[in-house]
Structure formats: structure tokens, C-alpha cells
Amino acid sequence: MAADPGHAPGCKIGQLKIPELRAQASMELGDDFDLRNFDDTVLEIVSAPLPALERHVYAGSRHIVHCTCLGNAAGAQENAP
């Protein structure tokens, strides 16, 4: 018998929610979506309640977009003659 009977349903809900968040981030980021970055973002806060995880993933995807834009601009400046 499990010591915490709510643990298994919580894991199942996370198992269903994380792919949903991944699809949302992938759709938002398009070609800039990186599964490794997504996984790192989720693992940073995986034990948090789902609403906190959703906010963290959303903030992470916004950060990835921002960094990608900065990275492209910086790369363009470095390669400029």
C-alpha cells in the first residue's frame, strides 16, 4: 500500500500535462523550439504544482524567444565586416 495515495494520480496528471505544455511551447516557438531546452525548463521545477510549472514553462519559452532574438542579432554583428 502506498504511503501517499495522492501520489499516483498526481504523477498521471503530470504525465498528461507535460506533453500538452511541450506542444504549446513548440507551437509558440516554431523552428526555435528545442526539446532539450524544454526538458531542462521542466526539470528545473518539476516538483512544483502544475500552475507554477505552466507559468515556468511559459516564462522559459518567452526567455528562449528573447535569447534567440538577441543571439541572432549578436551573431549578425560578429559576422559583419
Image (cartoon, grey):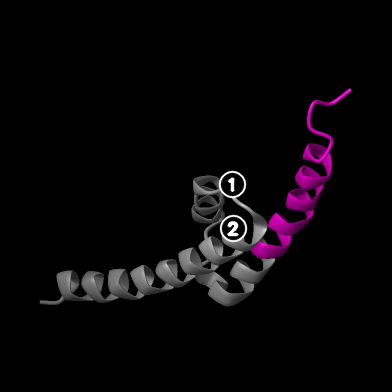
Residue 26 versus residue 45 in the image, above or below: below
Residue 30 versus residue 10 in the image, above or below: below
Main SS, magenta region, reads helix
Horizontal side, residue 63 vs residue 1: left or right: left
Instruction: State the separation of the CA atoms marked 1 and 2.
Output: 7 Å
Q: Quick one: which residue is furthest to the top in this view?
A: 1
Residue 47 x/y as whole percent: 60, 44
Question: What residue is shown at x 37% (from left), y 70% (from top)?
Answer: 68
Question: What residue is shown at x 54% (from left), y 73% (from top)?
Answer: 29
Query: Element type at marker 2?
Result: helix
Does the magenta portion include 7? yes
Inspect the image, locate mark 2, and give the three-letter code of the amino acid beneath it: Leu
Residue 38 versus residue 76 in the image, above or below: above
Residue 18 x/y as whole percent: 69, 56
Image quarter hosting the C terminus = bottom left
Say which label, 1 or 2, has the lower sequence index: 1
Residue 71 x/y as whole percent: 30, 69
Q: Which mark is residue 46?
A: 1
Question: What residue is shown at x 72% (from left), y 63% (from top)?
Answer: 20
Total numbered circles? 2
**Residue under label 2:** 53
Q: Which residues are magenta?
A: 1-21
Query: Element type at marker 1?
Result: loop
